[in-house]
């Protein structure tokens, strides 16, 4: 169902595609933070940017809610340094799977 919003249905789809494109360039979560601070910053910014675009897509169009939730979970993990273990791997994989579903 498309929610009332001035952003439009086409923009939601474009935002979802952009989120997944950015996400495709984020390495496994335990690799995001490295000894090279500038590389870590780039990966973190990509993940955060993907999450922002997913939120932008989900707001007007609830078909993108799963994408939004998956990427918000990943960003919360990055912000709290919860990057290792089965749950972190699962969160990373889920975001990738949802992106595959979005690409259809």
Image: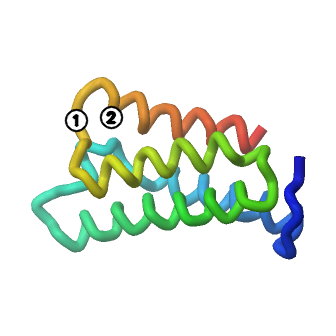
Image x and y of residue 66, in percent:
64, 40
Which residue is drawn at the image coordinates 56% and 45% (left, top)?
Answer: 69
Furthest residue in direction left, as rendered:
35
Label 2 element class: helix
Label 1 element class: loop
Is residue 79 found left or right of 98 in the rendered image?
A: left
Front residue (pair 41, 70): 70
Is residue 90 found left or right of 103 in the rendered image?
A: left
Colour mapping used in the image: rainbow
Front residue (pair 24, 74): 74
Is residue 103 found left or right of 29 in the rendered image?
A: right
In the rendered image of this protein, does residue 56 appear above or below residue 58? below
Quarter-wise, where is residue 102 in the image? top right
User: Which disc, if any, is residue 56?
Assistant: none
Which residue position holds label 1? 84
User: Which disc, if any, is residue 88?
Assistant: 2
Quadrant of the snapshot with the C terminus: top right
Q: How many numbered circles does the render carry?
A: 2
Q: Residues within 10 Å of mark 2 (few under 14, many from 20)?
A: some
Evaluate if marks 1 and 2 touch, with contact meaning CB atoms under 8 Å apart: yes
Image x and y of residue 60, in percent:
80, 61
Q: Residues within 10 Å of mark 1 (few under 14, many from 20)?
A: few
């Amino acid at each position: 169902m498309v929610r009332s919003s001035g952003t439009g249905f086409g923009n939601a789809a474009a935002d979802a595609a952009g989120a997944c494109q950015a996400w495709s360039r984020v390495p496994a979560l335990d690799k995001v933070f490295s000894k090279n601070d500038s590389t870590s910053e780039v990966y973190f910014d990509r993940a955060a940017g993907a999450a922002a675009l997913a939120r932008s897509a989900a707001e007007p169009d609830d078909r993108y809610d799963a994408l939004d939730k998956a990427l918000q979970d990943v960003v919360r993990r990055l912000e709290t340094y919860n990057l290792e273990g089965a749950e972190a791997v699962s969160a990373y994989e889920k975001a990738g799977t949802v992106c595959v579903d979005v690409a259809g």
